[in-house]
Each structure stands twice: as structure tokens, then as C-alpha cells.
Image (cartoon, rainbow, N blue to C red):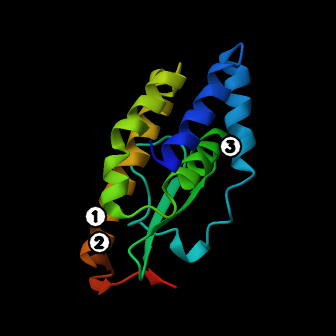
């Protein structure tokens, strides 16, 4: 089990210990406090997660060592908390390691009940976010993120 999987297991255990879905969602909202500010200039159509009722942006960057960093924004506290959990689970992984974590991310969503949210739109949002991250991480690996028709590498130090 990877260190990242260990974190997801810990969060899953904490969320499953909540006596009600309301308390579980309050716990997720607590994580939103750990989400760094999302730069306004990154709120672009390329970073917007489609198919969500909430406004959601994700931006994956890759450093020179090939490690991913997730940045995210949502106008929903619950989605922001989910993004903060994903950030902690994804930051520092390579693209290959991130792909290896896919099954664990799916299990996390199912085991916590997030994939079966009372609001189907929220469950769809979680899946749409993970899909957008996968797409961007693949583009990063190829150095092929396009912005306004120009190829732009997002390597960070």
C-alpha cells in the first residue's frame, strides 16, 4: 500500500465512523479549509470541470522530476473538501503512480458513499473531477497542454 493510499484509508475510516451522512459531509467540509487559493488566471475553460452543478476548476502541474501537483477550486464547500482530499492524495505522485491509484480512488468513493450521494449530481461531480485530473495529467506527461491554440508546458520548480 502506498503512502497516498494510506491517507485515503485514514480519511475513509474517519468518514465511515460518522453516524450520519450529514456529519460525514461536515467532515469533508473541514478538509476544504486545507485547500490553497486557486489563482484567478487559472480559471479558464480548459481547467473547468464540465457536467457539474457547482463551479469547479482543476489544474494539474508537473515539476521537472515528473511529480504532479493538483490545484482546485469550487464554489461548493463539499466539493472543495473533496478537492483538498484529492490534492493530499495526488500531490507528489508521478503520472504512472496516479494511474495505479485509480482503483483505490474508486474504492474510496464507493466505501465512503460519495459515489452514491443522495444528490446524483454530486456523485457525478466527483467522477467528473477525477476524469478531468486524469486528462490533464496525461497532457502534462506529454507536454501537450494547449492554451489559446499554443502548446504550453506547465513545469514547476
Q: Residues within 10 Å of mark 3 (few under 14, many from 20)?
A: some
* Disc marking residue 90: none
Give percent across and percent down for residue 7. 58, 43
- Asked whether, in this view, residue 135 is left or right of residue 104, the answer is left
Residue 41 to residue 127: above or below: below
Q: Which mark is residue 138?
A: 1
Which residue is painted at 39% across and 39% down in the image? 127
**Residue where numbered disc 2 is placed:** 141
Q: Position of residue 152 (x, y in %)?
A: 34, 85
**SS category of the residue bearing label 1:** helix
Q: Quick check: marks 2 and 1 in contact, CB under 8 Å? A: yes
- Residue 77 badge: 3
Extreme residue toward the front, this view = 1
Q: Residue at x 50, y 40 (%)?
A: 53
What residue occupies the far top of the structure in this picture? 19
Spatial separation of the CA atoms under disc 2 and disc 1? 5 Å
Quadrant where the N terminus sits is top left
22 or 2: which is nearer to us? Answer: 2
Amino acid at each position: 500500500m502506498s503512502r497516498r493510499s494510506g491517507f485515503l484509508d485514514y480519511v475513509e475510516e474517519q468518514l465511515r465512523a460518522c453516524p450520519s451522512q450529514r456529519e460525514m459531509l461536515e467532515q469533508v467540509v473541514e478538509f476544504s479549509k486545507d485547500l490553497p487559493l486557486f489563482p484567478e488566471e487559472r480559471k479558464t475553460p480548459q481547467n473547468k470541470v464540465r457536467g457539474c452543478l457547482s463551479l469547479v476548476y482543476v489544474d494539474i502541474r508537473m515539476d521537472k522530476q515528473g511529480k504532479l501537483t493538483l490545484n482546485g477550486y469550487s464554489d461548493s464547500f463539499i466539493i472543495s473538501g473533496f478537492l483538498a482530499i484529492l490534492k493530499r492524495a495526488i500531490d507528489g505522485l508521478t503520472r504512472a503512480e496516479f494511474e495505479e491509484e485509480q482503483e483505490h480512488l474508486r474504492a474510496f468513493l464507493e466505501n465512503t458513499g460519495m459515489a452514491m450521494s443522495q444528490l446524483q449530481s454530486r456523485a457525478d461531480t466527483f467522477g467528473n473531477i477525477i476524469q478531468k485530473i486524469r486528462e490533464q495529467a496525461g497532457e502534462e506527461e506529454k507536454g501537450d497542454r494547449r492554451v489559446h491554440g499554443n502548446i504550453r508546458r506547465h513545469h514547476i520548480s
